[in-house]
Amino acid sequence: MAEKREYRMEELAELAGITVRTLRFYRERKLIPPPRREGRIAWYDDHHLARLRTIAALLERGHTLSGIAELAEALDHGRDVADVLGVGPTEEEPVRLTPEELAARFEGEVTPDNLAAALELGYLGTDGDEIVHISRRLLDVSSALVREGIPLAEVLAAGARVREHADALAELFADLILRHAPEEDLHRLRPLARSVVEAELSLALDRRLNKRL
């Protein structure tokens, strides 16, 4: 494990490419966490440096300091990644992102409200200075929808509704399987349940598109 480094204010400011005055301003605005105090000396660490670099990247993308402060507060109060991912097995591949990488994925759409909604849904968790999305597939699809012009807020609202239906379908299949097979067969028969849902959704989309056309 790498040794934890600590920096005085002047050294941290130099590494981050900002002035000491700017660093003090960020601290007063609570854009960065308080330093560790040792008498009259303030010690900063790599967590502070990562946060400062994130602030710089978000400012370059047009975010305001007020908006960044709200984003930071949402992340600081978000659930830990262990709480989001849980302890059981999953077929989904989590994705680790820095805040600026997340902002790049959803250009102009990473607002405090959208971030709070994604955290509340459990799509995102925090792990130190990183953000973890629970599913690469969901991340790719949601960013593709946003690129097509659909507001992220509406994508997240749709995701919440889909979650309700998905939970109901999962309950239906789990009950069906457990009435006729031992519990350990749930994982083995999972692909069959997924295939039924995918086929029915495909047919439903066909019906809706034919009706519209």
Image: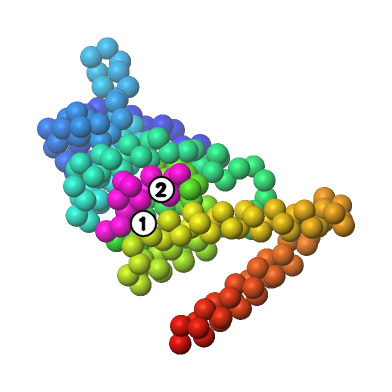
Which residue is drawn at the image coordinates 28% and 34% (left, top)? 32
Label 2 sits on a secondary structure element that is: helix
Q: Where's residue 212, x and y in %?
A: 46, 83
Judged by its main secondary structure, the magenta piece is helix
Which residue is drawn at the image coordinates 14% and 36% (left, top)? 22
Which residue is drawn at the image coordinates 37% and 48% (left, top)? 115
Is any part of residue 131 visible from this angle? no
Could you tell me how far apart the alpha carbons at marks 1 and 2 are, in whole angstroms?
A: 8 Å
N-terminal label among 1 and 2: 2
How crowded pointer 1 is (Cα within 10 Å; few <14, some 14-19, many 20+) is rated as: some
When the figure is inspected, residue 189 is found, relative to residue 112, above or below; the finding is below
On screen, residue 16 versus residue 80, left or right, reads left
Q: What span is in magenta?
A: 108-120
Q: Nearer the viewer, residue 68 or 20?
A: 68
Q: Nearer the viewer, residue 150 or 18?
A: 150
Task: Indicate which disc residue 74 carries.
Answer: none
Label 1 sits on a secondary structure element that is: helix
Task: Indicate which disc residue 117 carries.
Answer: 2
Give amino acid for label 1.
Ala
